[in-house]
Amino acid sequence: MELLAHAPIFKGLTNDELARIAAGTAQVHAGKGAVLFNRGDPCNGFHVIAYGQVKLAIPSAEGGEKVIEILGPGRTFGEAVMFLGNPYFLGAIALADSMLLHVARDTVLAELDREPRLARRMLAALSMRLHVLVKDVEGMALQSATQRVIGYLARLEDEAATPGGVTLPAQKALIASRLSLTPEYFSRILHQLSEEGLIRVEGREVAITDSARLRRFGVP
């Protein structure tokens, strides 16, 4: 119940409501590299990340993958597929030692019938996911590769506790896939931004030296 109460999607629910959800929730411990599910597996609930990090990706026929999202603590995934009753269309792998909560579909549906606040929160979460997806499609269609990288760094800076520096949430190759770039092209863009004096890169640490000019860079 304590872990559920800290998840944003369940914020504000009463102890009785949380207890009913907890009764249909299982803890999932996953070591780094563990597969949580594969594309085509049945979906009978959704996951909440208590701690750790999870990669959602679509495998390619050539053996590669397209990273869709990299998620950290408090984030949820699987809700939309759960409601549709379809198998997973992507796979999930733990990028670090993680602990997740798996909330069963029947438990969710029963609680939605009782508590409209939960329905509003789940709708908000799915709407935000759709908004991010639309922004991603917009970026792929209308933005240059450099603009996509800048936009990603800007989002990380906006989410950071203090401005001026961000930590890439995963290896650069995974970030590159998330942005539909090759790792080499992603590294070249970071090098270009460094040469322009806009950022400094040390491993996964990126210091943003001029946030305003970075966000304007490459904009027609």
Image: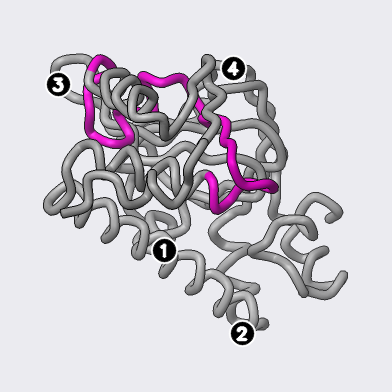
- Is residue 217 highlighted in magenta? no
**210 is higher (above) or lower (below) than 207:** below
Look at label 4 and name its amino acid: Lys
Q: Is residue 119 left or right of residue 140?
A: right
Label 1 crowd (10 A; few <14 / some 14-19 / many >=20): some
> Amino acid under label 3?
Ala
In the shown orientation, is residue 203 left or right of residue 137?
right
Closer to us: mark 2 or mark 4? Answer: 4
Judged from the image, the secondary structure of the residue bearing numbered disc 2 is helix
Whole-number angstrom distance, CA of label 2 to CA of label 4: 36 Å
Identify the mark at residue 83; answer none if there is no mark. Answer: 1
Give percent across and percent down for residue 179.
29, 36
Q: Disc 2 to disc 1, how far (Cα)?
A: 16 Å
Q: Position of residue 18 (x, y in %)?
A: 79, 65
Residue at the (48%, 73%) spot, across then down: 123
| Residue at image point 33% right, 35% down | 178
Please name whichever residue, 22 or 74, is drawn nearer the observer in this view of the structure.
74
Q: Residues within 10 Å of mark 4 (few under 14, many from 20)?
A: some
Lower sequence index among marks 1 and 4: 4
Residue 173 in picture, x, y percent from top left: 36, 19
Q: Which residue is mark 4?
A: 32
**Amino acid found under the numbered disc labelled 1:** Phe
Is residue 181 shown in magenta? yes
Classify residue 73 by image quadrant. Answer: top right
Amino acid residing under circle 2: Pro
Image quadrant holding the N terminus, namely bottom right
Residue interval drawn in magenta: 157-184
* Structural distance between the alpha carbons of marks 2 and 3: 42 Å
How far is mark 3 from mark 1, CA to CA? 28 Å
Q: Which residue carries the number 3 mark?
A: 61
Per the image, the residue denoted by label 2 is 116
Determine whether label 1 and label 4 are within 8 Å by CB.
no
